[in-house]
Image (cartoon, helix red, strand yellow):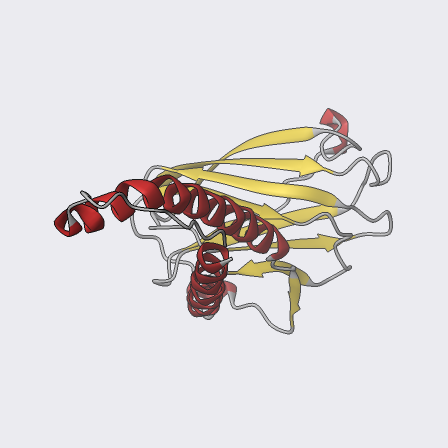
Amino acid sequence: MTFFIVDFPSSFDAACLPYFWFFTAWPWFINKTMKAFYFAFLFIISAAESISLKPHALDSFNLSLIQNVGSCSYQVIISTSCSSPKYTRDAISLSFGDAYGNQVYAPRLDDPSTKTFERCSSDTFQITGPCAYQICYAYLYRTGPDGWKPESVKIYAYNSYPVTFDYNVFIPRDTWYGFNLCQGASSAYVGRVQVWFVFVFLLVVVAVIF
């Protein structure tokens, strides 16, 4: 912090002193505040990028939860990683849904005759199933000898914001493998956000002081 020593003239009115200090210190305060928010912004961005949810395997997956309530259309885009085998003959299935028990099941999305799930490719599927709200979980199932490495699964629905599940890992054989963001993830995110704000507040204080 820089201190200024000012020699006031004898005729200087003491009542003007607060205004003098206000206009003198204002540029310094603005400069320090802008720097503080800049570094805080960089901190938040780096912290956000460090949060990544990993796919996991399920010991059991209950397909009996599927409800035949309504009929809605979903667009699903599955991208295959460039480090996946050149092609796969494995049987690939998908299931996704919301937090209210609405579950969509799409068996056997694979079709080797149309070069589905080839390396470095993206395949689009139009799937019809029960109407769901915000999609918050998705699981893939693979059975076969070839292996397959999806990069991402994107789901578009009328009653849901688009959601992307980033895999970029090989799907284990004969196992439902994916993400469930319906429970626990939101509370964990809130906890991280609270920690971020504490750090940001401290960062602003330190930047303004020094």
Q: Is residue 26 above or below residue 145?
A: above
Image position, residue 126 (x, y; %): 49, 32
**Residue 160: where, in percent of width, then height?**
36, 44
- Locate residue 47: give its quadrant: bottom right
Q: Nearer the viewer, residue 179 or 89?
A: 179
Q: Position of residue 53 (x, y in %)?
A: 60, 59
Q: What's the residue at 79%, 46% (across, down)?
A: 148
Res 159 seen here? no
Image-quadrant location for residue 28: top left
In the picture, measured across the screen, residue 35 lies left or right of residue 17, that is right
At 49% from the left and 64% from the top, the residue drawn is 199
Q: Is 79 left or right of 112, judged from the image as shown? A: left
In the figure, 172 relative to 158: above or below? below
In the picture as drawn, the residue positioned furthest to the top comes out as: 114
Specify whether 144 is left or right of 189.
Answer: right
Is residue 210 something that shows in the picture? yes
Q: Nearer the viewer, residue 4 or 123?
A: 4
* Residue closest to the far front: 10
